[in-house]
Amino acid sequence: MSNQFYPEWPDPERLLVVEDDDALRTTLVDMLGTLCRQVRAASTLHEAMREVAQHPPELLLLDLGLPDGDGAELLRRLRVTTDVPIIVLTGRDDEEEKVALLDAGADDFLVKPCGAAELLARVRGQIRRAGVSKAARRWTRLQLDGVEIDLLEQRVVRHGEPQRLTPTEWSLLRTLVLHAGRPLSPRQLWDLVWNREFGDYATHVRVHMTHLRRKIEPDPSMPRLIVTEPGVGYRFAAPPPARST
Ligand code: CA
C-alpha cells in the first residue's frame, strides 16, 4: 500500500520467514531475497521465538499452522516480545478471521498462494508503515491543508477556528497517532481508549470517530488523516511532521 507522504523508504536489512512447509518456505525466502540481503527462516514457533530474540528482523512473515503452535495464540506470544511488523500467511480470505488476527496483533495478511509481486508490495508497505509509525511517535505538531494539531499543547485549529476536543477524543487521536500506519479495529480502539469490558463498542467508536473527524479533518467527508480500512477498522495516515524553524 503506497503512502502519499513517504513515497520512498529504504529496503529492509533482515527479514524472517516462519513456515513449516519446506517447499513454500524456500520459495518465500527466494522471493524476499530480491528485496533484502538477509532473509532468515524458521519452521516452528520455538525457532521463530529464538530467531526474533537473537536476530531481530524488520518484518516477520508468519504461517499460522505450525507444528508447535497455532493462530492467534502464536501471534500474542510474539507480540509480548516484539512490535515488529507481522504479515500473516492465511489459507482463507475471510474478513472475520482477519479482524480476529488483527486483534491478536497482525499487521497485514496474505492469502496463500500469493505471487511474488504482491508479496513484495505488502512487505515494502509494512516496512514503510513501521518507519512512519516510529517517526509519528516523535511528533508533537501536525499541519495539513488548513488544519493544525498540537498534541502536546492539546490544541486544534481547523480553517482558522479553534476546536474543542473532549478528553475521549484526545485519547482516541493520541492512540491512533501512536499506532500511525497500522489499522486498528473498533475492538482494539475500545480496549485502548475506553478500557471498559462491556458496552456497544462498535457504536461508541463510530460516533466518537465521526465527531473527531469533524474537528480535525480538512474535509470530514473525505478523511485523509484518519482513513477507514474497509472491513477492518481505522488507520492514522501520517502527514509529514511540521518543520521546526
Ligand atoms: Ca503450515
Image (cartoon, rainbow, N blue to C red):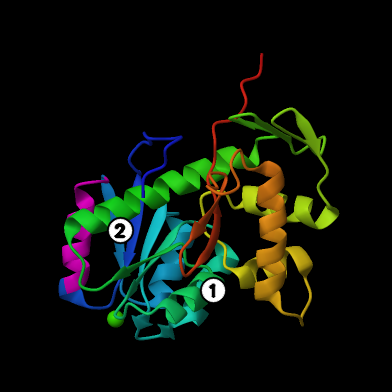
Q: Secondary structure at mark 2?
A: strand
- Identify which residue is drawn at 36% across, 50% down: 1
Q: Is residue 31 magenta?
A: yes
Q: Is residue 203 magenta?
A: no
- Identify which residue is drawn at 26% across, 52% down: 120
- Which part of the image, by quadrant, shows the C terminus? top right
Would you place residue 211 above or below residue 205 in this image?
above
Residue type of the residue flagged with mark 1? Ala
Stretch in magenta: 24-36
Name the foreground residue: 200 vs 39. 200
Q: Position of residue 49 (x, y in %)?
A: 46, 69
Whether the residue carrying mark 1 lies under 8 Å from ligand 1 is answered with: no
Residue type of the residue flagged with mark 2? Arg
Residue 149 in the figure: left or right of residue 96: right
Would you place residue 70 above or below residue 187 in this image?
below
Name the foreground residue: 91 vs 71. 91
Q: What secondary structure do most residues of the magenta stretch adopt?
A: helix
Would you place residue 189 above or below residue 157 in this image?
below
Q: Which residue is mark 2?
A: 40
- Identify which residue is drawn at 27% across, 46% down: 36
Q: Find residue 104 and name its label.
A: 1
Residue 206 in the figure: left or right of residue 183: right
